[in-house]
Amino acid sequence: MEEKMTVLVTGGSGMLGYALQKVIKEKKRPGEEWIFIGSKDADLREIDETRTIFEKHMPTHVIHLAAIVGGVFKNMKNTCDILLTNQKINLNVYQVCKEIKVKKLISCLSTCVYPDKITYPITESMLHDGPPHPSNFGYSFAKRSIDAMNKCYRWQYGCPFVSVIPTSIYGPNDIFSVEDAHVIPGLINKVRMCKRANTPLVVWGTGKPLRQFIFSYDLAQLVIWAIREYDEEDNIFLSVDEKDEISIRELVEVIVEEYGFKGEVVFDDTKTDGQYKKTVSTAKLRKYLPDFKFTPIREGIRETIRWFEDNYDIART
Ligand code: NAP
Ligand code: GFB
């Protein structure tokens, strides 16, 4: 008899939550129930609202994604608010997961929270080996305190809490607002505007930084695998391999080609590049899933542009 699994996903209305909803439709197993919540269902900054929604659904397993998230420019502008809000959300979710004795809690860190001055490729155990890049200081320490809670709740109360660590994610239902978005959705929205206004595309920074980008639907499959089968105490990177790392300049070429933009492209190097690179090793992930196939970036961007064009009116712009 399949063990009954009730999985509650916080941040279920966001980009990764949306991808999980899409993927689990095809991959749900008998005995599994999946519940997706957003801030409209409960404001997780409030302990009472958090307790009420968790006690209503009594999950056996929790995937904790809820957070204030954004690109390098949003992080720099809101570093304190992001630290405080994300810490409040995390403290409440962890406390209630202990209270209702969940069988597993998987939360989400990010590769950008690792030390900026470090040897590459980065491995999972290097998290506290130095300060993060100043551009995402507040966001990083809220995430690092998640790692501290995983360990402390496990050491003192035996709670099965652990984290997965995605690299830069992109895909449908992302934040596309030019000011707050990450580079891929931000540029996709800009290209759409420039095509209509017949103006040059302004890329921020020098175009030199390097990034590993993972398509949200691929990441959703890996998160589903983790909640079902990943039972280690230590965190794990969920990222495309090092060989798939590309520069922002190469990324711009793919977006421009896929969107059919023929206009001028200029780089505004008065804007920050943020972290130069944050290359992570996927050796641990590949030990578990040696044959996992990632969506090539050109295909993922084509699908994201198509979603944005089809859903422009409801997209977060
Ligand atoms: P997102 O699209 O911005 O979604 C954020 C989610 O958090 C939304 O569902 C939002 O609900 C919810 N939320 C925010 N404040 C809340 C509150 N006070 N109470 C309840 N829910 C609240 O984020 P994402 O890009 O999918 O990121 C998912 C996770 O992956 C986050 O933990 C993020 O830190 C991590 N991550 C993201 C990236 C990336 O490149 N995006 C990279 C690495 C790690 P509403 O929409 O209803 O407000
Ligand atoms: O995606 P992004 O905002 O975040 O920027 P990070 C990536 C790179 O793209 C930077 C350049 O070098 C930017 O200078 N870039 C060029 C642009 N044009 C644009 C544009 O129009 N919009 C944006 N946003 N960037 C984030 C962290 O760092 O990584 C977050 O701040 C989060 O906390 C995320 O974790 C995954 O990759 O630099």
Image (cartoon, helix red, strand yellow):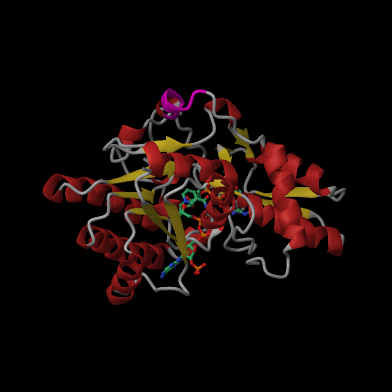
The residue at the far left in this view is 156
* Residue appearing at x 19%, y 51% in the figure: 153
The number of discs equals 0
Query: Residue 20: percent from the left, percent from the top?
Result: 53, 51
Eyeballing the image, is 103 above or below 295? below
User: Does the magenta portion include 85?
Assistant: no
Eyeballing the image, is 238 above or below 13? above
User: Could you tell me which quadrant the N terminus lies in?
Assistant: top left
Query: Residue 213: percent from the left, percent from the top?
Result: 58, 40
Query: Residue 298: percent from the left, percent from the top?
Result: 72, 38
Q: Nearer the viewer, residue 145 or 296?
A: 296
In the shown orientation, is residue 254 left or right of residue 182?
A: right
In the shown orientation, is residue 259 left or right of residue 104?
A: right
Eyeballing the image, is 219 above or below 118? below
Eyeballing the image, is 28 above or below 312? above
* Residue appearing at x 62%, y 59% in the figure: 173
Q: Nearer the viewer, residue 98 or 258?
A: 98
In the shown orientation, is residue 312 left or right of residue 31?
A: right
Quarter of the image for residue 192 reads bottom right
User: Could you tell me which quadrant the C terminus lies in?
Assistant: bottom right
* Residue appearing at x 53%, y 29% in the figure: 241
Q: Main secondary structure of the magenta part?
A: helix
Q: Which residues are magenta?
A: 285-290
Q: Is residue 63 visible?
A: no
Query: Residue 59: percent from the left, percent from the top?
Result: 34, 59
Q: Is residue 41 visible?
A: yes
